[in-house]
Amino acid sequence: MSVASAAYLARRAAQKERVRILYRRALKDTLNWAVHRHLFYPDADALREKFEANRHVDNIETIDRMVAAGEATYNKWRHPDPYIVPWAPGGSKFCRNPPPPQGIEIIYNYGREDNV
Amino acid sequence: MASVLRSSILRHIRVPISGALTLNGSDLIAVRSMSSHGDDHLDKQEVISRVLDVVKSFPKVDPSKVTPDVHFQKDLGLDSLDNVEIVMAIEEEFKLEIPDKEADKINSCHLAIEYIHNHPMAG
């Protein structure tokens, strides 16, 4: 029926990676919207159910369309102010206090400045 | 007189600080690092124990099978979506932000421990 050629498998693998990344982002987004854990757990379960319902789809074109639709839904529901770890890009501590360049030292010469 | 001579000499000489401090007992020249974060890597045993705790508290996992070398999908019989959930739980435990491409590659406990141990900001 379906010849498992390398191109087909490569395309399926790329689709699976897209699905995993979409699930990861959607889960983080769910956590952004539902801050408290007791609200997050049912929402995460509902998200998982949505992914599980389409688990056994085989047709590549259908899968492509479903992944595109999922990504469109994700883009529509993205939180405007997501939680980002402070030191990561977009966080509040990003690029704050960068380490000074190498080889620069402070010379302590108290009381022995030039204008003695 | 001597003070004038001294100051005129000192005007032309810069004497740098040479502090051969010992760091952890070893004879290194101490680099006075001024960044207040990200310098301390975690202890490997601590990383291993925390990662194993996270994996064991996952509801679909049998805690007795979890070892530091276990593969999430092959040994524990988990799904790729479960893998994503475990990586997210590890991110929350260590207060990390793992990029999507890197997080996709973490498939086993060993990889997770390696990644966290080598990450400079692991909390």
Image: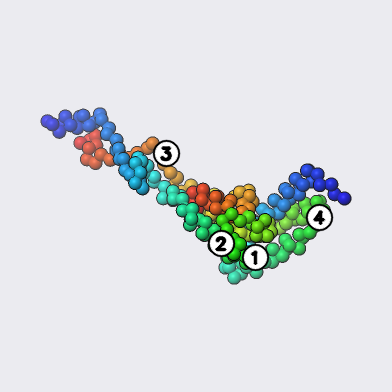
Q: Which residue is mark 2?
A: B54
Residue under disc 2 on the same chain as residue under disc 1: yes
Q: Chain of mark 4?
A: A
**Dot 2 lies on which element?**
helix
Left/right placement of residue B22 relative to residue B65 reads: left
Q: Residue at left 67%, top 56%?
A: B74
Q: Alpha carbon of mark 1 to alpha carbon of mark 3: how far?
A: 48 Å
Q: Is residue B6 above or below residue B101?
A: above
The disc at residue A101 is: 3
| Mark 1 surroundings within 10 Å by alpha-carbon count, few (fewer than 14), some (14 through 19), many (20 or more) | few
Q: Which residue is mark 4?
A: A58
Of badges 4 and 2, the one in the foreground is 2
Mark 3 or mark 4: whose residue is earlier in sequence: 4
Instruction: Tell me which corner region of the image, top left, top right, bottom left or bottom right, holds residue A32.
Output: bottom right
**Amino acid at the residue labelled 3:** Pro
Of badges 4 and 1, the one in the foreground is 1
Q: Alpha carbon of mark 4 to alpha carbon of mark 1: how far?
A: 26 Å
**Amino acid at the residue labelled 1:** Lys
Q: Residue at left 72%, top 48%?
A: A14
**Amino acid at the residue labelled 2:** Val
The image position of residue A67, as x and y in percent, is 74, 54
Q: Alpha carbon of mark 3 to alpha carbon of mark 4: how far?
A: 55 Å
**Amino acid at the residue labelled 4:** Asp
The disc at residue B60 is: 1
Tally of numbered discs: 4
* Circles 4, 1 touching at the beta carbon (< 8 Å): no
Residue B74 in view, yes or no: yes
